[in-house]
Amino acid sequence: MKLMIVADDLTGALDSAAPFAMAGLRTEVLRRVAGPVTVDPAVEVLAISTGSRDGTPEAAAQKVAAVLDALPGLPALVMKKVDSRLKGHLAIETALLARRAGRERLLVLPAIPELGRVVAAGAVDGRGVDRPIPVAPRFAPLNIVAPDCATDADLDAALAAGPLGDRLMVGARGLSQALARRIGGAATAPAPRLAAPFRMAIGSRDPITLAQVAALDGIVAEPAPDGAVAPEDAGGAVTLVQMTAGATPCPAPVAGSRFARGVAARLRAAPPATLLACGGETADALLAELAIDRLHLAGDILPGVPLAFARLGDRPLAILTKSGGFGDVDSLRRLVAMVRKDSGSAGTSLPVGATT
């Protein structure tokens, strides 16, 4: 194994691992670790979601420690994937991973130039950021190096400032892209075609995602108030169900769990060829309901929208995920256009060698 990525949520694990798959490295993602981890010797990049972004710092530390205890060891290169808007328990998780990996130097690079998110004057800024977010305080009391980065060249220069193996690399998708340029091989073949039926489950309420849903042409979003999903969808090539606020306040975890159960029941009853799960918590909860824990990653179908493969029962399933704050206003519309263009395909098959 060349690299291990430890992320605090599933969509982060997927979107940070995608650049390595695109660079020709065999890449797998573990949605959750429930016991000793067995790694296929052919896997070159392994990304693991600890599911630790929410909850208390103490709970986050326990989850990260449990994952690290389950691993046979750490490779020479280790990356701590963090949210590009610096959400989550950054300091405690980073400190724990640094100790386990034996790294005293911490290089923090949360910029994603591809998505218009940069680090300037020591703070994350740019698209999707209401006001600059200072980087160093989110990692206090750790001693970090966090250079300003506005371009891919800036990220490349930061990595080139020292040997990769003597630092714990901390960052988001932009860091992954820079690392993939350093350790990757030949680019992979184009991503497989997207087949219908295509089912979209939108749990995120981020303004970026809401704008993407509103921009869809000819598709009416089916509301799921407080996560309540009707037993059957409308059928057809493309459908979208979206979690919305109900008439009375409902705790987000309750609504999210209800939404995942309802969508999963539909998918088991009528398995689609392609699934989009939007929102980190939504994707994680939905795949948990479907008993999908290991995914073979093909790469990006759009920037920030990774394509992975698993099985739903005895059928192959193409899985797209998207963080709520990722993508431009046309992202969902472009995915639907791909499915409609490829709807005459015979279906979606697992890549050669996939074991999910």
Image: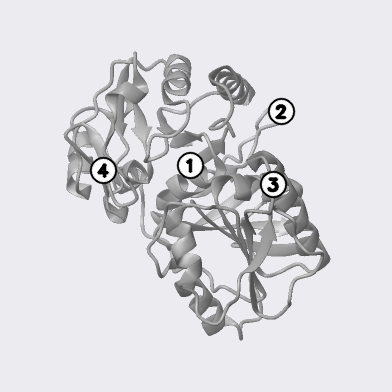
Q: Name the residue under label 4.
A: 125
Give, as a three-letter code, the residue at label 4.
Answer: Asp
Q: Relative to residue 187, is residue 87 depicted above or below?
A: above
- Who comes first in sequence, dot 4 or dot 1? 1
- Who comes first in sequence, dot 2 or dot 4? 2
Q: Is mark 1 on a helix, strand or loop?
A: strand
Q: Mark 1 points at which residue?
A: 45
Q: Name the residue under label 2.
A: 35
How far apart marks 3 and 1 lie (CA) works out to 34 Å
How far apart marks 3 and 2 lie (CA) works out to 28 Å
Measured as percent of width and height from the top left, residue 218 is found at 55, 82
Q: Does residue 55 appear to the left or right of 288 in the view shown? A: left
How far apart marks 2 and 1 lie (CA) works out to 19 Å
Crowd class of label 2 (few under 14; some 14 to 19; many from 20; radius 10 Å): few
How far apart marks 2 and 4 lie (CA) works out to 39 Å
For the question of whether residue 42 can be seen, the reply is no
Q: Please tell me the numbered disc located at residue 191.
A: none
Give, as a three-letter code, the residue at label 3.
Answer: Ala
How far apart marks 4 and 3 lie (CA) works out to 31 Å
Instruction: Pick whichever, 188 or 170, lies toward us.
Output: 170
- Who comes first in sequence, dot 3 or dot 2? 2
Crowd class of label 4 (few under 14; some 14 to 19; many from 20; radius 10 Å): many
| Residue appearing at x 36%, y 52% in the figure | 185
Q: What element carries label 3?
A: helix
Q: Please tell me the numbered disc located at residue 255.
A: 3
